[in-house]
Amino acid sequence: MAQPLILVTATTRRFARPYVRSLQKHGAGVVIATPHKAPPADDPLGGATGLLLTGGPDLDPALYGQASDPSAGVESNRRRDDMELALLRLALDRDLPVLAICRGMQLLNVAFGGTLIQDLPDHRATHQNGRWESAYHQTYLAPGTRIAAVLGIGGFFRLNSRHHQGLREAQKSPTLLASAYSLGDGIIEALESTAHRWVLGIQCHPEREDETPRAFVRLFQRLVERAEIEAG
């Protein structure tokens, strides 16, 4: 079979590196798209047969019909927003496999017509001893969902958190299925599309392998496997 090729979106190539390493461990080729070096207009996906949307800055609230809350500390990058939305919609039209992480999951919800909570202080990373440290929380992942099938297990997990925006049921797109929740506050921790073969979003950062249960690396493995099938 042809080598699977994954398009990875990020603000800069440097921020893409942890995700790229996680994909390459499973044999994927990688193309990186940034706001400053987007794929050519005649081939936006760059020949990729899978899409990985990574973490990064906040989404522009205008994309989901809201004004920016002055108290929320919103820091957005509209060029990246527009680039990723166009790539995501093209991937969805082609029914390609998509894995959306953190900001990526939020973008997935907005692309399907949902909204966001602009500030969630309890989910932020904190600056300690000269570095940013992840927050942690208990999450329930529903058995029987597609993400549980990928991981090989459902139930309760201790997961990392490095975001300050997100969604609950009131903000969720009605066309997406929520498959995991933060136990403390009901923040949705995973989404999946029932209208596509393999479109998954997760709020934690599985590329930080020392901060998430070992099973979560299977998200990258399965994305590569699905992209390999698409590559023929």
Image (spheres, helix red, strand yellow):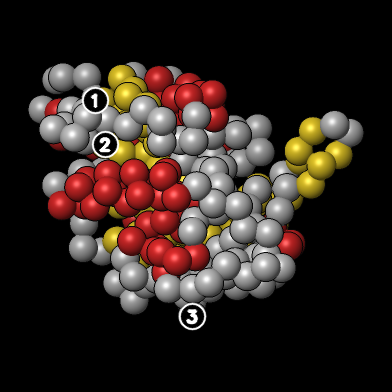
User: Where does label 3 land, which residue?
Assistant: 170
- Mark positioned earlier in the residue sequence (1 or 3): 1
Per the rendering, the mark at residue 158 is: none
Inter-mark Cα distance, 2 to 1: 8 Å
User: Where does label 1 land, which residue?
Assistant: 4
Q: Are marks 2 and 1 in contact (CB under 8 Å)?
A: yes
Q: Are marks 1 and 3 in contact (CB under 8 Å)?
A: no
Residue 175, quarter of the rendered image: bottom left
In this view, the residue farthest toward the left is 232
How many circles with numbers are drawn on the protein? Answer: 3
Inter-mark Cα distance, 1 to 3: 37 Å
Residue type of the residue flagged with mark 2? Gly
Up-down relation of residue 211 to residue 73 (above or below): above
- Mark positioned earlier in the residue sequence (2 or 1): 1
Q: Residue at x 34, y 70 (%)?
A: 113
Residue type of the residue flagged with mark 3? Ala
- Mark positioned earlier in the residue sequence (3 or 2): 2
The answer to whether 165 appears left or right of 65 in the picture is right
Secondary structure beneath label 3: loop
Inter-mark Cα distance, 3 to 2: 30 Å
Up-down relation of residue 131 to residue 53 (above or below): above
Crowding at dot 2, Cα within 10 Å, few <14 / some 14-19 / many 20+, comes out as many
Up-down relation of residue 9 to residue 77 (above or below): above
In this view, the residue farthest toward the right is 129
Q: Position of residue 140 (x, y in %)?
A: 57, 63
Crowding at dot 1, Cα within 10 Å, few <14 / some 14-19 / many 20+, comes out as many
User: Where does label 2 land, which residue?
Assistant: 50
Q: Position of residue 18 (x, y in %)?
A: 53, 27
